[in-house]
DNA sequence: TCGTAAACGAGACGGTACGTCTCGTCTTCGA
DNA sequence: TCGAAGACGAGACGTACCGTCTCGTTTACGA
């Protein structure tokens, strides 16, 4: 229902086929990686004709994108707000540790990583993703930081987008580059360092 | 000279052809991106036979990598050390602004971006790049931060790699994602924010 | 219909493309000769993909073979029998002169010669040709000779295949080797010599 | 000595290399066939540079031709005349059976067949071959037939070249086309048929 | 006897074509 | 009319040889 509103579909469209295609895309992305993922392969695995895919999606990136949306369906609305206990540092650590957990689950992580890389290449895909997933989530984060700012826990003239980058950037970077383990310790360190800065703090 | 030592070449090898191939690779990578870069296209643009490329490079990634090495040739040794005037913040701003300038020059930036993305996919390529370009530069940065640490300008227990991520990560992230302009103001803001932290500072 | 029976084809096969390929093959064979005829060139001239040729034909010889069959289509059935006026010598001269005329027409002769040579190299091609063109024609010739044998104009124990070789061999040989002009006089001489033998005849 | 006169060579030319090249050519022609015989392959097998081959021969056909000449060296002069016992039929049978034996020896026959086919394509090669090997042998045959003609064993107005074609054509044809076994029986039949003609002879 | 000029091995080079592969589009046909 | 099947145009892949062109290195002559 929700999906229908977002991407209006012909009444004729076979939901069974759509599901088979998205499932096949997810599986293949995990198995062979994005580069060797092909429309041809997805169609074969799904038992669908290639034209059926080309009719409904503009690129393999778009297929994978919808496939990941399908995985997330229903979850979005639940966590409509980030925790706000008043303790910014603690709240951020909780949220980042949830992110760490998600990025360590290969079922989500592998296709998502493939998609993230493809978005670096395909600007249309990136725009679509930003509008439908990234920006809403980012807004939640900004809301939490604004609350902290009002509570005097964040510098009053802080650029919130830079702050977001300081907090979530290192995680995303390690994940994309695969150049270090994604641990809760790392998440905690990042939160502390970002909040306190690199300089020594007068204690 | 340096290059010769690293990758010994047959005396027979035509340097003119080598240069034409690397130049063509850079141009094409900038024009069409890594995915649509082809050995065939490089050979055609360079006026070279395909076999000449296959003789000397194992993959298109390797060609582009050498091409970027060629761009950097000679520069490496000059800036063998990062500036160290004693004022960490000023020094970091100088260095990051140089990085900004480099990333805004499409001649360097476009092919480098293509390669950076490919490295996310191709682990071998990433390892090669890390060893030959990234790690040496990173070591220079670490050295500067260690010096600051000794001077009491950096928290004494700071993890330097996290610090590097705080300082250079945001720049790299904006560049890769193309999600904001790379300005000197941005670089300055990042340096200040990273050094001071997100919390308000007692003034 | 006739063609379908001979080489059963997928219902999906594009007849327009098939025709374009065979036409291009004939033209190119005439223009550049068999040796410099290439699948790549045929595909380009026909506006077809190379794979389409490789899908349906095993070699450039096979393409040219089909192209020549296409030229001959419809003619086959007309001359279903060789002339039989009762005068063997006269009938043979008529038939051989028709052969001479055909072999002197470069439109047929040049590609056919190329194909004849290729058949010396490619046994599969030769087998295909023998079955579909050569053997049927040879049977017509044998029939005429058998009729002559019954009429007492041929030695009763004559091996008809040797006789065929005596009559048509010299023509084919001159044609293949290009070592003499193919004239009606030559055809007549061959018929007379073969019939009468090399020895002097008691007159 | 003889060879030197025919194809004058620089005094500098390395006979060892020449021999290695011709031997390699023969071996490879036997192993992979003429079509897949390559200058590159010959040079590699012979331990020679490609330029050394291109310096002395215009084509792979020419190399193979010289290689076959090398095989025949010395034999030429021995059989300077065809047998002439006065019995034409018997003499011809002897000679044709010798030819049959030669054509059944794959050591000679396979490269020779490849060369014969190549001569159908390459007119220069054919001219060279005709001048140096074919025409001298043909003249021997004509001489024997003229002798028979004088003895009244051949029709006095017989065109000797047509007669040669009648006698040797069928053998060559079977050999080139591989369309029948080359037996002594076949040779005998051909001689008898050619001499007596196809018509019934008054006994 | 020693220089020198050629012939030589080696193999890089710009090319052509190979036969295979995969892509995204187009066509046919059965449900 | 939709979807499965798959032929099609397009074009890159990596390989094999082509014929030309240097490179040193023999090799054998003639000064």
Image (cartoon, coloured by chain):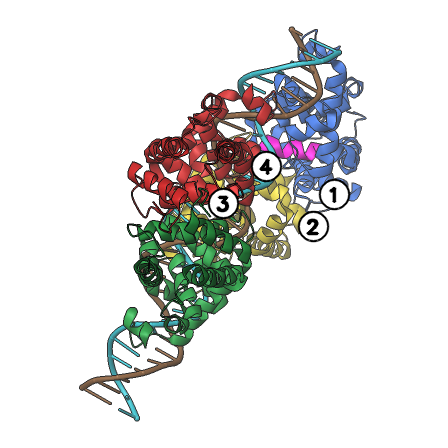
Chain colours: A blue, B yellow, C red, D green, E cyan, F brown
Q: Chain of mark 3?
A: C
Q: Secondary structure at mark 1?
A: helix
Q: CA distance from mark 2 to mark 1?
A: 9 Å
| Span of residues in magenta | A111-120
Q: Chain of mark 1?
A: A
In the picture, measured across the screen, residue D175 lies left or right of residue A197, that is: left
Label 4: which residue?
A: B173
Q: Secondary structure at mark 4?
A: helix
Q: Position of residue A17 (x, y in %)?
A: 74, 18
- Which residue is nearer to you in this view: C25 or A124? C25
Label 2: which residue?
A: B159
In the picture, measured across the screen, residue B21 lies left or right of residue B134, that is: left
Label 1: which residue?
A: A189
* Foreground tag (3 vs 4): 3
Quadrant the N terminus of chain D occupies: bottom left
Q: CA distance from mark 1 to mark 3?
A: 98 Å
* Foreground tag (4 vs 2): 4
Q: Are marks 2 and 1 in contact (CB under 8 Å)?
A: yes
- Which residue is nearer to you in this view: D78 or D34? D78
Q: CA distance from mark 4 to mark 2?
A: 20 Å
Q: Secondary structure at mark 3?
A: helix
Label 3: which residue?
A: C162
Note whether D20 is above or below B16 in the view shown.
below
């Amino acid at each position: 229902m929700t999906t229908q509103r977002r991407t209006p579909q012909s009444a004729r469209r076979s939901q069974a086929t759509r599901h088979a295609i998205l499932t096949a895309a997810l599986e293949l992305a995990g198995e062979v990686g994005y580069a060797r993922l092909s429309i041809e392969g997805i169609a074969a695995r799904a038992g669908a004709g290639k034209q059926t895919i080309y009719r409904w999606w503009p690129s393999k990136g778009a297929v994978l994108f919808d496939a990941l949306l399908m995985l997330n369906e229903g979850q979005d609305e639940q966590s409509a707000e980030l925790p706000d206990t008043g303790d910014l540092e603690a709240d951020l650590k909780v949220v980042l540790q949830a992110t760490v957990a998600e990025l360590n689950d290969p079922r989500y992580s592998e296709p998502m990583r493939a998609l993230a890389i493809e978005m670096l290449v395909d600007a249309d895909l990136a725009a679509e993703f930003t509008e439908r997933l990234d920006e809403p989530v980012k807004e939640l984060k900004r809301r939490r930081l604004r609350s902290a700012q009002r509570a005097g826990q964040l510098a009053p003239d802080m650029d919130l987008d830079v702050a977001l980058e300081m907090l979530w950037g290192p995680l995303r970077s390690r994940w994309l580059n695969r150049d270090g383990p994604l641990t809760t310790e790392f998440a905690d360190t990042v939160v502390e360092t970002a909040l306190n800065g690199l300089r020594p703090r007068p204690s």
